[in-house]
Image: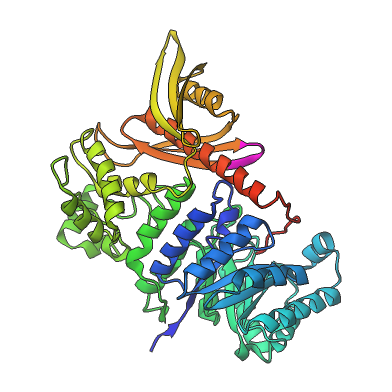
Amino acid sequence: MSERVAVFDTTLRDGEQSPGCSMNLEEKLRMARQLDALGVDIIEAGFPIASDDDFAAVREVARTCRRPIIAALCRTTPEDIERGWEALSEAERPRIHTFIATSDIHLQYKLQKSREETLEMACNAVRMAKRFTDDVEFSAEDATRSDLDYLCQVIESVIEEGATVVNIPDTVGYTIPSEYHHIITTLKQKVRNIDRAVISVHCHNDLGLAVANSLAAVAAGARQIECTINGIGERAGNASLEEIVMALRVRKDLMPFESGIVSEEIFRSSQALSNITGVHVQPNKAIVGKNAFAHEAGIHQHGVLKNRLTYEIMTPESVGVKTNSIVLGKHSGRHALGKKYEEMGYDLSRPELDKAYKLFTKLADQKKEIFEEDLLAILQDGFAQIPERYKLRAVQATAGTSTLATALVTLNDTKSDDASTGTAAGDGPVNAVYEAIDQLTGLKGSLIDYTVRSITGGTDAVGEVFVHVEFDGTSYTGKAASTDIVDASARAYLNAVNKALYSRERKKALGGEKSPAITAAD
């Protein structure tokens, strides 16, 4: 019988630390529900001491997701652990995850602590966390650059204090598979009480070896892998969940291990994260990239038509990729639309279906063929949870090679139920639209990133716009989809504006408290 490897997903914590990947509370909850459907064993929901928003996210994920273990990250300080437990207190299956660095370079330059002081802090933290919950994970940050004898001493000591999981992170993506295998093997041989804890691994991808290192660690005896959807995370990212899971499944002959992941939910999870963050995977990304199951070379096409196994080591369906288009148009009814959403895994309530149908008919009037990607865009663009202070009523822009770009924008202010119109000029039609929106809302945004992509093919394709906009030093993402790219650009920017206004109101309601400076782990 195959041994089981637990999947610890840190998309909502380490993944969110990736530049441009921050999520608000509603987006974290949406992603957490998808991770639950994916079947991950542990969801690391955030770093509660980092901010009020992070605390709220951990608390709400703990309340919402009852099947998986919900973990909260904490430094080895009493304040962190108490705050972490406060956020986790309503979880069905809570885990406190505490960490401290063990490499000499971190001890000297970051912590300015001796090995003895660091060991004491680690033990005290685990002992304190154990008073709140039986499930305590300890991470030795920068473990792969730590003295191996000292690392063994720390791991043995924290297990003695009650740690049930010990994580050996490759924090800076420094190690290689053979070396990592040796580290895990040494821990299993030299730590006398290692059988009382699960060995976990958390690999970063700075040398492109995060997945390979994770699999090498499993071969050496690790039984928990920490990873993220699409491999997002600090710097070059984390080990990619989808790559690890499918490697274990495809190469069961060499790695006879099971996971609880529902692989058919992989592609949907990848798409959900991309739509939330606006950060899309490259076309040649393994498992979930646009070209992962595409065959262009004639010899490849011939082989696949004869037998898919010639050039496909897994089927698109096994990871939830559907290659067929759907036959839905402007004459389709609510029942057909609802049935299609059911087939895609979305069970919409009647009010949700009514809303989706309204957006669907509007889109069907604009293009001949509707694809599943269009239907996903309807859900992702039309079901935003952030209250809309401003709604776009109309937008008109003009531009040309010898004409200054201008825009006329009309917005509805839902707070006063008034409509106002503004005009502005800019370097191009989109810039002019954004200048007009700034005039009407009174906010001055600084556009950090603007991305547009075609969701579907054809001349009537739906264009999806993602923006990162900075307001008062804080970056917000916005997204929208339309067959009219100026309309999508305007609504994406408004989406970011509404998030900024919502965040400002929440901070006022919370009294504008500031959180202490935080050092990220792993």
Q: Which residues are magenta?
A: 471-475
Image quadrant holding the N terminus, namely bottom left
Residue 517 in the figure: left or right of residue 179: right
Residue 485 in the figure: left or right of residue 221: left
What secondary structure characterizes most of the magenta part? strand
Residue 181 position, x and y percent, is 58, 76
Residue name at image x 32 percent, y 45 percent: 378
Q: Is residue 111 visible?
A: yes
Residue 166 position, x and y percent, is 63, 79
Tell which residue pokes out farthest to the left in this image: 331
Residue 236 position, x and y percent, is 57, 53
Image quadrant holding the C terminus, namely bottom right
Residue name at image x 60 percent, y 72 percent: 88
Q: Quadrant of residue 345?
A: bottom left
Q: Is residue 301 above or below residue 259?
A: above
Residue 319 in the figure: left or right of residue 224: left
Figure disc tally: 0
Q: Between residues 134 and 369, which one lies in front from this camera angle?
A: 134
Residue 139 in the figure: left or right of residue 204: right
